[in-house]
Amino acid sequence: MYFTGFADEASSDIREQVRATRELGWKYIEARNIDGCNIHDLPEDKFEEVCAVLAEGGVSINCFGSAVANWAKRPDSEEDFQKSVEELKRAIPRMQKLGTKMIRGMSFVILEDQQPDSPELEKEIFRKVQYLVDMCDAAGIAYLHENCRNYGGLSYKHTLKLLDNIKSPSFKLIFDTGNPVFSADYAYSEPRPYQCAWEFYRNVREFIAYIHIKDAVMEFDSEKGKNVTRYTFAGEGCGDVRAILKDAFKHGYNGGISIEPHIGGVVFHEQNNNLPEADVRFRNYVEYGRRMEKLVADVRS
């Protein structure tokens, strides 16, 4: 087991991302955005600079947090599909150069006007995801699917259907503990409840290759007149983080634990309103990582 994280939540600057990782005593970053640009979209000279900074800091990229087939891309759009293909074409040689074997991918967004269980729509989703997975397989890279705002994230049943229809032994799951908290459960008819993280996890456990940690609660905002998401430290929300990790370790999980805090300025802005925003982001990320280490030690003891 090892720790890693979306270090762009500490800083948009790769040097600060490396510094936060080293302050935690970790060796890995899950690369997503650098200077506001996904790592697979960086200009070549900037990517070379990133490689040099990583090498100098002794930090590696364990996973590309790509935008491939993500929540901004429709399954019925050929243009969106081609965007994902091109993103993957740029990502693969960069991953090979860095020795990175995993890429986070998704299964396209489902809009409110679409019927997710339509055979025609599902056929398109399975065909396109299969194509992306085949690209990764040919390059010796694992396409790992995250339960986010996409077809496979609609419910554990949709994830299982996706797994049944994608033919590849390397196609596995990234399970995010926080995403179910604010996601409608499409295993039910309207009005749909929010998903239960524990239920989702328990039904897909055997296919999980990697774990993202974030946590949250849903709270009613009287001014907005609707429920809103409030992110918390791991184990303090409704993401069943402790139960999931305890069970995962019990069943032999030995992969990465990747933090994705999303907590903004909740810690150090409360303690010192004079801190620059950059310092707040950095300190919150490091604090989240330290608390994550303690939580893992507690559930493994």
Image: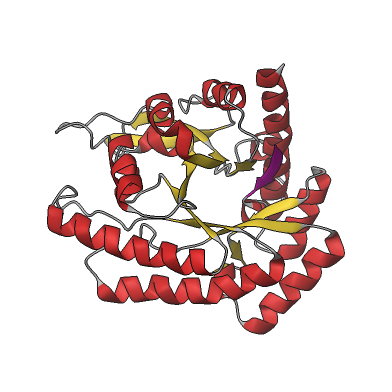
> Foreground residue, 283 or 136?
136
Q: Is residue 3 magenta?
A: yes
- Predominant SS along the magenta part: strand
Q: Is residue 46 above or below residue 299?
A: below
Based on the displayed image, in which of its 4 quarters is residue 68 positioned?
Answer: bottom left
Q: Is residue 124 magenta?
A: no
Q: Is residue 272 visible?
A: no
Q: Is residue 103 above or below residue 274?
A: below
Q: Is residue 148 left or right of residue 300?
A: left
Based on the displayed image, in which of its 4 quarters is residue 92 positioned?
Answer: bottom right
> Foreground residue, 112 or 75?
75
> Foreground residue, 156 or 220?
156
Q: Is residue 208 left or right of residue 118?
A: right
Span of residues in magenta: 1-5
Q: Quadrant of the C terminus?
A: top right
* Residue 177 on image: x %, y %: 49, 34
Give the residue at x 23% y 33%: 187
* Residue 245 on image: x %, y %: 58, 26
Q: Is residue 176 above or below residue 150?
A: above
Give the residue at x 84% y 60%: 57
